[in-house]
Amino acid sequence: MASILIVDSHEATRDLYQRELHRSFSVIAVADAEAALQVLQTTDLVAVIVEPAGLDDSGWNFISTIYNLQSHPPIRVILCSALR
């Protein structure tokens, strides 16, 4: 089963994504960029779902870090925001 990573500081949002996606993917959910980077270094992922605003000032830098990783096939990055 393909693995995806959810990176969101809001626990309820992580739980929602996890409930909806677990039928089709192996889901790993973390609250911060540091934990996400550890997962990125040890797990083959097909996608990362990120709430950039939930990572304080490091959200956009984290996304750049994902794109700079040498991964084949490349990891898809999906931005999902619950902010209004």
Image (cartoon, grey):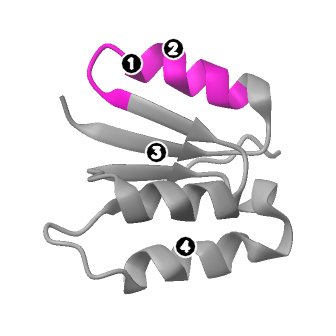
Image-based side of 46 in relation to 55, left or right: left
Cα separation, mark 4 vs mark 1, equals 23 Å
Instruction: Describe the element under mark 1 as helix, strand or loop.
Output: loop
Quick one: quadrant of the C terminus?
top right
Q: Position of residue 26 (x, y in %)?
A: 33, 28
Residues packed near mark 1 inside 10 Å, few (<14), some (14 to 19) or many (20 plus): few
Image-based side of 70 in relation to 22, left or right: left
Residues packed near mark 2 inside 10 Å, few (<14), some (14 to 19) or many (20 plus): few
Cα separation, mark 3 vs mark 4, equals 13 Å
* Residue at the left extreme of this rendering: 73
**Any magenta on residue 37?**
no
The residue under label 4 is 63
Cα separation, mark 3 vs mark 2, equals 13 Å
Residue at position x 40%, y 79% from top?
Answer: 67
Q: Position of residue 57 (x, y in %)?
A: 83, 75
The amino acid beneath tag 2 is Arg
Residue at position x 79%, y 54% from top?
Answer: 54
Q: Which is nearer the eye, 65 or 49? A: 65
Please give the label number shown on residue 22. Answer: 1
The residue under label 3 is 5
Q: Which is nearer the eye, 55 or 83? A: 55
Q: Looking at the image, tell me whether mark 3 or mark 2 is earlier in sequence order.
A: 3
The amino acid beneath tag 3 is Leu
**68, above or below 50, in the image:** below
Q: Are marks 3 and 2 in contact (CB under 8 Å)?
A: no
Q: Looking at the image, tell me whether mark 2 or mark 4 is earlier in sequence order.
A: 2
Per the rendered image, the range of residues in magenta is 13-26
Q: Are marks 4 and 1 in contact (CB under 8 Å)?
A: no
